[in-house]
Amino acid sequence: MTYSEDWHQQQAVIWFRNQYSLINSNPYFEILSIPNDGKNIKEQMRKKNTGLMSGASDLIIVYPNKQVLWVEMKTPDGKQSPDQKKFQQRLEYRDWE
């Protein structure tokens, strides 16, 4: 049986929240998604105008010390798009300090 990227992402988020995002979790982490897909051009334009960035990672994990981990979900045969590669490069080569 083949599962979609969405299915894998859902399972990862459920697992992560059960491990690290419960009220009594110590340390407590937060995980959230960036809904960067859309069904029509009008919805995509609205998202872009409110901050959507092409190629942005699927998930963000926020650590207790305010560090952030960007997570891109892929199926075993999935590949990064050119926009995803550009987004990754922008984050990797930035001096955050």
Image (spheres, rainbow, N blue to C red):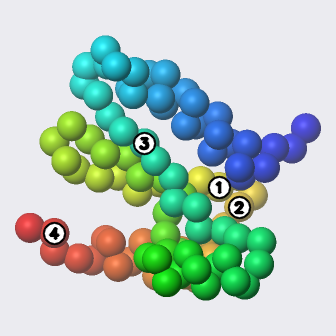
The tag earlier along the polypeptide, 3 or 1, is: 3
Badge 1 amino acid: Lys
Q: Given the image, on which type of amino acid does mark 4 rest?
A: Trp
Question: Alpha carbon of mark 3 to alpha carbon of mark 2: how far?
Answer: 22 Å
Give the crowd class for mark 4: few <14, some 14-19, many >=20 residues within 10 Å: few
- Circle 2 packing at 10 Å, graded few (<14), some (14-19), many (20+), is few
Mark with earlier residue (3, 4): 3
Residue at image x 38%, y 46%? 61
Residue that lies at the very extreme toward the left in this rendered image: 97
Q: Which residue is mark 2?
A: 78
* Rendered view: 69 above or below 27: below
Contact between marks 1 and 2 (CB within 8 A): the answer is: yes
Question: CA–CA distance between discs 1 and 2?
Answer: 5 Å
> Would you name the residue on which mark 3 appears?
31
**Quadrant assignment for the C terminus:** bottom left
SS assignment at label 2: loop
Numbered label attached to residue 96: 4
Q: Which residue is mark 1?
A: 74
**Alpha-carbon neighbours of circle 1 within 10 Å: few (<14), some, or many (≥20)?**
some
Instruction: Check disc 2 and give the amino acid type.
Output: Gly
User: Is residue 50 found left or right of 97 in the rendered image?
Assistant: right
Q: Is residue 62 left or right of residue 52?
A: left
